[in-house]
Amino acid sequence: MLLNRIELFVNVAKHQNLGKTAREMHVSASSVCQRLKSLENDFGVKLYKKNKEGIELTGAGQSLLTTGSEVLNQLDTLRKTLSSASEIAVESLIIGGTHVPSAKYLPSAIAAFQKTHPDVKVTFITSDRASIEKLVRGFEVDVAIIQHPLNSSDFSMEHFAVDHLTFFAYPTHPLAKKKRLDFEDLSQTPLIVRDRKRTSDRMLKQLKCRGLTLNITLRCESHDAVKAAVRRKMGVGMLFYSHIEEDVKRKNLKILNFSGLPMLVAHSYIVYSKSRSLSCAANEFLALLRSMKTRLKNPLNISESNDDCPVP
């Protein structure tokens, strides 16, 4: 309270007018007078006297103005210093991921992490593998999950999850009603895939090498667009299972199992740079991902070591 009254007195001395100070503070002039009177009682001296223009400081008032201004300036400096220190103390965590892990695993991992680490500033970046690799290498991403391993000794890399490319259709599609499907069924039906996706293209080439030529009639920019086209019965879709898992569970889409078709498997990996020690937040997020790995369910019991159609 004393400090507040000193601050009021410095403002009054600056204006040398009680009315101007009261208007600036949006209070009454009588309230200003009462608080200044309390300040005079605190020190037992007369701090000002009134004149025709406003007020005039006494000798004691001049001394209080000089010392009080210094105290307030030092207090302001202290506030700024403490505020800066508080900002520096805020720990940050930058997480990266390629598109499939970013859609399937990382949102739930980040949500769980933020519940236990509300003071950590988390940034989430989704991009292609080359971009994420560059960001990790440049220390612009702390921990990332990517599909397919990186051929570099600069990174620590841990296997995280396994996914597979899946053919699917709308439940009323003619192929969805057949009890047995073979290569010929797949080669004759219109196929809807992601546009310019390296993993999909590699796997399609692998199928072609096995003598299967597919009828690709539509390439979509996103997996949601692929699913939308399938729902409109435009053809059979091809996506990673993680993209259609919830739709399959709700019976909005149906998986098509073609006899003799090899399992097209892709793995995802946790990566981080070996050149820099991880922060406490990054280490704790890494521990969370490791615990998630042990709880991940493999819906079709895919072997992590399945190399029938490995993806480089």
Image (spheres, rainbow, N blue to C red):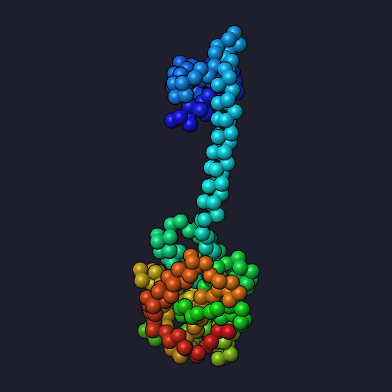
Judging depth in this view, the residue of 34 and 297 nearest the camera is 34
Q: Residue at x 47, y 88 (%)?
A: 306
Residue at the limit of the structure toward the top, as seen here: 52
Using residue 167 as the reference point, say whether residue 12 is left or right of it: right
The mark total stands at 0
If the image is split into quadrants, where does the N terminus sit? top left
The vertical placement of 278 against 15, above or below, is below
Judging depth in this view, the residue of 126 and 280 nearest the camera is 280
Q: Position of residue 146 (x, y in %)?
A: 54, 74
The vertical placement of 24 against 225, above or below, is above
Q: Residue at x 55, y 84 (%)?
A: 311
The vertical placement of 305 against 236, above or below, is below
Q: Residue at x 43, y 89 (%)?
A: 259
Q: Position of residue 87 (x, y in %)?
A: 54, 52
Q: Position of residue 142 (x, y in %)?
A: 55, 68
If the image is split into quadrants, where does the C terminus sit? bottom right
- Does residue 255 appear anywhere in the picture? yes
Q: Residue at x 45, y 85 (%)?
A: 304
The vertical placement of 236 against 207, above or below, is above
Q: Position of residue 169 (x, y in %)?
A: 44, 74
- Does residue 169 appear anywhere in the picture? no
